[in-house]
Structures are given as C-alpha cells and as structure tokens.
Image (cartoon, helix red, strand yellow):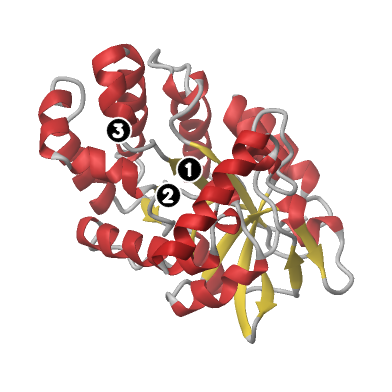
Amino acid sequence: MADTLYHALVLNLHQPHGNLEHLLQHNEWEAREILFATDRIPRSLVDYPDVGRVHLALSATLLETLTHSDFQSRAYGIVDCSALIWNLCNSPTINMLGTAYYHPVMPLIPPADWPAQVERWRGFARRLFYNSDFQGFWPPEMGFCMEMIPLLRRMGYRYVLVDSEHVQPVGSMRWEEVRYQPHIARYGGEEMIVIVRDRDLSNAQESGMEFDWFNKEVRERTKNCDFTPLITTCSDGQNGGWFRNVTPGSNFWDAFYKPLMDRARISQDAIQPIFIEEYLDRFGATGEVTVGPGAWNTGWHHGNDFVQWTGTQAQKDALTRVDEVSQAVH
C-alpha cells in the first residue's frame, strides 16, 4: 500500500433558471434547505484552512440567482447571498471548477453550441471568482465524450472529470491503476488529463456514509497500489437529505467530512484531502485511456448512452428541436 492516500472531493451545485425563486414563493422550506446546504459549505470549512480541500462546480443559472439583487433581498433573512459568494471566492479550502453555462449535457447538444456554453460561463464566473484560474472542467451531469477535448484545451483547461464507468485503458492497467491515477486522453491532435471519479464511493458519498466506513473501504481498494493514489469522489452538493439535513451531526459535513479533516490534521497516515492540481503538480498523469460517451449515474440509470435524457419520445423530440434551433441560429 502507498504511504499516503489522497482524496479529492468534488461537489456539483446547480439550480435551473428561476427554480429557487419559484421555490421561495411556493415551497419556502425546500428553498431554505437548498440555500442552507450551499451556505453550509464555506461555513463547515472555515476552521480547517490547513486541511480542507473541496472542489466546487456551480452552474451559471445558480450563480445568476445568487447574485441577483432582488433574490438577495428576498433571501436575506435566510442566507446572505453576497457574503456566501465572497466566502466561496476567498476561502483557501475551495477550488472552483469550470463548467457550462446552462448546465447542458454537452454531448447531447450540437457541437456548434459548445464554445458559447463554455466561454460564457468562464466570462461570468471570472468576475465573481477572480482568485480562481479554473484549471479543471466539470462536464454537467458528467456528460462527456472525447470530441470535447480540443475545445476544452483551447479554453485553457488542464483536466476534466470523468466517470469510472466509461474509462478504458489503452495499454495494460490494473483495476486500481485505472481508477486511482490521472491519465491522458487524446483526440483530434490534442491531449488532456482525465481525473477518474470512483462511482461506487461517490454513490456512498451522495447517499450517506460515515468516515470509518469510508476509511476502511478506501484502504481495501488501494491496498495493492504501488503508486500514490488519488481517490476522487463526486456528487451533488445540495440535493438529498444527506446534504440538506439541518440537524447538527446528521449531514455530510458534520458526520463525514469534518471527521475526515480532523484525522488528516493529526496524522499523516490518515487520508489527506488535496486539490487535484496540487496532486498533478507533484505526481503527474500516468498512462493513456479512452473515455466512452456517457454520464454519471442518477437513480436507477447507469449513465451509458445518456439514457436519462434520451429514453422517452418526448425527450427525443426535445433534442430534435434543440438541434433545429441551433441550426437556425448558426
């Protein structure tokens, strides 16, 4: 087993356009839960500047809402949205990932629309998160295909996050080598680092887990590693009772991540949180892989062939209309 086990935590935060405003008017408690879950992130990390390391991907539709003066006034008695944005920007424990503006499943929209989605998000987010250099890209819903690589490289991204279900080694690699090392993927004369999300551990992160279980599971999964492993877990950060629970000691931060940070602080033998770019600077990327088209799993959907968004006739008709509108615009 490797001397040190590194953990990269990634949380996705998204709300559709107008959703929080609608909830605040018609289902205030759910709006409160979402706002509390978002505000809880920097608050939970404030006492851990030495060991807290969290990657966040925020859709522009969510950021639009949080920065709108009317919404800020309506939400002020719940969460101070201006202070929340400031804390997200200035916390040394938070690393911002780039994403696409309207949270589209990128491989399902016309490639002609990709640049606008990526460029517009960067332009909007750069004004808010002026301390960030956005080295990593979070594909909405982890929807990825290799054809995206040239655009992401042109936009200046160093790495992209992908789901372990879709990663295949070009050469010979053991199971743990595929899952717990950054790799290189090549397409169209460009190459990009891919960071592999452990689907099983991420499922546990989303549904609820204790640190002791996670610690044992990670050590079992990495026991044959003859390299320094990077264990990457990714999930939504504001959905479900595990993240929304307001009872102290009964949510992701109190029951899992604070105990992880406490252990990391007192022992170098404990699992150590790390920013992905810090790991890359120290250990680099190893081996070449291909990444099949697909997304992360949601509910009972496995994410292969984007079945969550293409399975019904209504969904297929909607995608056809998206393509028709794109052709008319371009």
Residue 230: quadrant of the picture: bottom right
Q: Which mark is residue 11?
A: 1
Residue under label 2, please give it: 57
- Label 3 secondary element: loop
- Label 2 secondary element: strand
Amino acid at pointer 1: Leu
Taking depth in this image into account, of 323 and 204 the one nearest to the observer is: 323
In the displayed structure, does residue 307 sit left or right of residue 177? left
Please tell me whether mark 1 or mark 3 is closer to you in this view. 3
- Return the x and y of residue 127 as percentages of the image width and height: 20, 60
- Return the x and y of residue 265 as percentages of the image width and height: 46, 44
Spatial separation of the CA atoms under disc 1 and disc 3: 21 Å
Residue under label 3, please give it: 18
Residue 70: quadrant of the picture: top left
Residue 43: quadrant of the picture: top left
Please tell me whether mark 3 or mark 2 is closer to you in this view. 3
In the displayed structure, does residue 124 sit left or right of residue 294? left
Vertical comparison of 313 with 174: above or below = above
Tag 1–tag 2 contact (CB < 8 Å): yes
Taking depth in this image into account, of 161 and 155 the one nearest to the observer is: 155
Amino acid at pointer 3: Gly
